[in-house]
Image: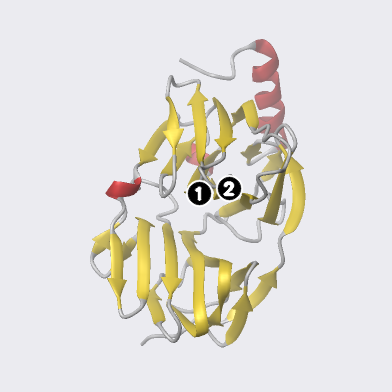
Amino acid sequence: MLNNRTIKEIIEPQYVLEGAGVLLRRSIAPMLSNRFDPFLLFDHFAFNDPADDPIRGFPMHPHRGIETVTYILKGSVNHRDSLGNAGLIGPGDVQWMTAGGGILHEEMPRRGPDGIIDGFQLWVNLPAAQKMSRPRYQEVGTETIPVFDKNGCRVRVVAGTVAGLHGPVTEITANPVYLDVRLEARARFSLPVSEAHTVLAYVFDGQGLFGNTEVSSVRMAVFGDGNQVEVRANDSQVRFILMAGATFGEPIVPYGPFVMNTQEEIQQALADLRDGTFVRK
């Protein structure tokens, strides 16, 4: 029997400065309470005024114990890391990086032809058994992301399955769903989801009815219990990122770019950085 999830919380993003002075909208951040397990952080970086100061980006920095997901709407990001990966991700591209036991990487945003940068970064937790695993990197070009397009509903399937279309990001422990959904006026979207999954929707354009609650941009909607998500557009379109993932139910200790399970593991990460042993062969 289908049981539609309702909205139990709406979060208004807060502006924060990160990296070398990058202004972001942050909806969730790593917390000891681990309220959105397995999701740790969600940032929206949007530079819409070409007259703004030069974008300083995110110089080389470490991560351990998490996965990071970068999705670009406009502009691009130059990246390189300690695995030897380097390149440019542009509109519609995705970078899904498993930091595991330790990785250093750099992300430097670049404006598109219209002077705009727009995109998102999500952090997904790793369970204790995989926090020190070998780092892994998946770069997904826009042309490889399947699109469901029917009756005013257009869905880009990065991870998970929609109407038999499987996203190219695979072998992720949290078994995530990551979708870019756009509904034209009066269109409807529904998706069966596991009752054991945490489900979030980041609404970044327009407004719509999420379950039984109207949510307008720019907001993060947190779904309650159930086995189906249903969204309907009102008189105008709505666009949102839908995320779902299996909970791990483990305690976490976040510290900057690290999310581990104990304070001792955080201290070890800091010691490894000092000793030059953070990136392991």
Judged from this view, the residue extending furthest toward the left is: 164
> Can you identify the residue that label 1 sits on?
74
Whether pointer 2 and pointer 1 mark residues with C-beta atoms closer than 8 Å, the reply is: yes
Residue 111 numbered mark, or none: none
Instruction: Indicate the position of residue 225 as horizontal and vertical percent values.
Output: 53, 77
Q: Residue furthest top?
A: 275
Image quadrant where one finds the N terminus: bottom left
Q: In this rendered view, identify the residue nearer to me: 188 or 109.
A: 109
User: Secondary structure under badge 1?
Assistant: strand
- Say what amino acid the circle numbered 1 marks: Lys
Q: Is residue 99 visible?
A: no
In this image, 55 relative to 240: left or right?
right
Examine the rendered structure and indicate whether residue 39 appears above or below residue 281: below
Please state, as top left, top right, bottom left or bottom right, where the C terminus lies in the image.
top left
Corner quadrant of residue 265: top right
Q: Quadrant of residue 2?
A: bottom left
Residue 159 in the image: above or below residue 76:
below
Seen in the image, is 119 located left or right of residue 56? left
* Residue underneath mark 2: 116
Which residue is at 54% across, 27% downward?
102
Q: Which residue is found at the position 54% from the left and 67% from the top?
A: 201
Q: Quadrant of residue 194?
A: bottom left
The amino acid sitting under disc 2 is Ile
Residue 23: percent from left, percent from top: 72, 45
